[in-house]
């Protein structure tokens, strides 16, 4: 798709979003936005954006961001939320299909999804995610991660986080309030890895950087060994967690990305090229894949400019930053996958720096090349889920 095609679609989607969503229309009026102007790279920052905070449950604006009648909403898509205050996005079937396809492309391009035969996930079973409590304005909420997991539904999946029924019941009875208890199934993890190693199964282990790092380092310390995986074994990170906090998981230290790569590369006996990262946010359908860069000692991520555009804004005054390697707040603009809510332009709380506006000099892929360098909001870690044994290999060390 040409640049003009994307910009024409952006212009059309801004107009239609303003017509469908009074909340967004009022922002456009306040900003005195000219709907008749031709949208291009030089004025794209003038498109009014929705601040990520408006999607937060505590702000109470999430219903106002819908572009279709509230009664037609099937369920909310919710973030995992380290703060206990999730984002809620109303998506229709068409939008859900768009973001699933975006994530599929990333998994294929960076982790060889079509070649994978087994998935090992640091996540609860999808049946549990379907039953997790959560209701807002009379509508159920389901984790954004659940919809991403459904992309892999035809694969053999080992879910490592197990729901502890009797602990949950006991706590509810003794404390007169509900709390879910979850533990990592250490036996299943060892069994899965041994089978993958022995049978040389093309496999992907994914989700939580903190859980992966802590458990595998504990295992190596305890067993004095690792695994000799086939060249088809892949490691997929995504969603951050390098601060040591991800969702309700909290370590007492930050994770150095270079050490993560070095230690897990040695633990599984695989090259750095077998690691991939993924960037996405609940508030936008866009997904970006990335690979390790020895130059930056970081994962560098790639945006397909056929799907979206980035605006980087100054942390101080939110003015547009046009230079590379200058950190700023990320705004994502896309006309695709936002038919059901005001998601055409979203200002997020992630701080990134653009390394190149057109091409990755390391892998040759075209697009906007960037890396995530920070976050505006703090990592807190709280909620109604208690992880009682997340590090089974820590025992008896």
Image (cartoon, helix red, strand yellow):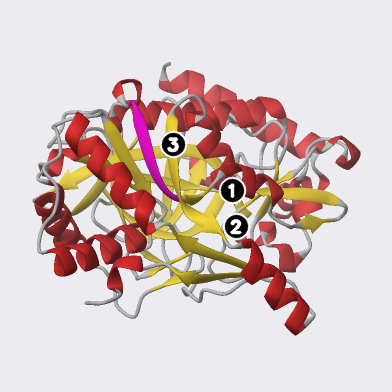
Please provide percent x and percent y for residue 122. 42, 52
Q: How many marks?
A: 3
Residue 241 part of the magenta segment: no
Q: Quadrant of the N terminus?
A: top left
In the image: residue 340, left or right of residue 304: right
Disc number at residue 157? 3
In which image quadrant can residue 79 be found? bottom right
| Residue 276 makes an appearance in the image | no
Can you say which quadrant of the picture contains the C terminus?
bottom left
Residue stretch rendered in magenta on the structure: 117-122
Which numbered tag is attached to residue 283? Answer: 1
- Secondary structure character of the magenta stretch overall: strand
Residue 190 is left or right of residue 380, and the answer is: left
Pointer 3 or 2: first along the chain: 2
Q: Which residue is mark 2?
A: 52
| Circle 2: element type | helix
Q: Which mark is residue 124?
A: none
Pick the residue in front: 394 or 282: 394
Residue drawn 64% across the image and 30% down it: 95
Q: Secondary structure at mark 1?
A: loop
């Amino acid at each position: 798709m040409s640049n003009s095609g994307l910009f024409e679609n952006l212009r059309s989607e801004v107009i239609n979003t303003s017509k469908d969503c009074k909340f967004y229309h009022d922002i456009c009026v306040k900003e005195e936005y000219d709907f008749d102007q031709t949208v291009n790279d030089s004025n794209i920052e003038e498109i009014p954006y929705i601040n990520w905070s408006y999607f937060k449950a505590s702000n109470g604006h999430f219903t106002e961001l819908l572009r279709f009648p509230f009664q037609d909403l099937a369920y909310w898509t919710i973030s995992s939320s380290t703060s206990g205050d999730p984002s809620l996005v109303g998506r229709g079937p068409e939008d859900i299909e768009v973001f699933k396809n975006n994530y599929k492309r990333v998994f294929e391009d960076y982790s060889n999804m079509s070649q994978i035969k087994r998935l090992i996930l640091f996540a609860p079973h999808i049946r549990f995610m379907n039953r997790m409590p959560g209701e807002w304005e009379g509508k159920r909420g389901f984790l954004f991660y659940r919809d991403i997991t459904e992309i892999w539904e035809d694969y053999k999946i080992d879910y490592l986080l197990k729901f502890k029924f009797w602990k949950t019941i006991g706590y509810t009875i003794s404390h007169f309030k509900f709390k879910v208890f979850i533990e990592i199934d250490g036996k299943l993890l060892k069994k899965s890895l041994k089978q993958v190693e022995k049978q040389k199964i093309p496999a992907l282990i994914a989700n939580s950087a903190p859980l992966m790092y802590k458990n595998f380092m504990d295992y190596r310390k305890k067993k004095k060994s690792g695994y000799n995986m086939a060249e088809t074994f892949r490691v997929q990170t995504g969603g951050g967690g390098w601060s040591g906090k991800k969702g309700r998981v909290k370590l007492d230290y930050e994770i150095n990305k270079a050490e993560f790569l070095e230690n897990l590369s040695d633990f599984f006996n695989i090259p750095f090229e077998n690691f991939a990262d993924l960037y996405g946010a609940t508030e936008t359908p866009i997904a970006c894949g990335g690979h390790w860069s020895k130059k930056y000692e970081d994962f560098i991520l790639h945006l397909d400019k056929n799907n979206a555009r980035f605006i980087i804004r100054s942390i101080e005054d939110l003015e547009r930053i046009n230079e590379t390697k200058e950190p700023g707040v990320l705004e994502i603009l896309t006309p695709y996958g936002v038919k059901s809510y005001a998601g055409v332009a979203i200002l997020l709380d992630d701080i990134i720096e653009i390394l190149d506006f057109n091409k990755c000099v390391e892998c040759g892929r075209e697009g906007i090349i960037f890396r995530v360098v920070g976050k505006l909001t703090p990592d807190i870690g709280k909620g109604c889920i208690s992880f009682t044994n997340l590090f089974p290999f820590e025992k008896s060390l």
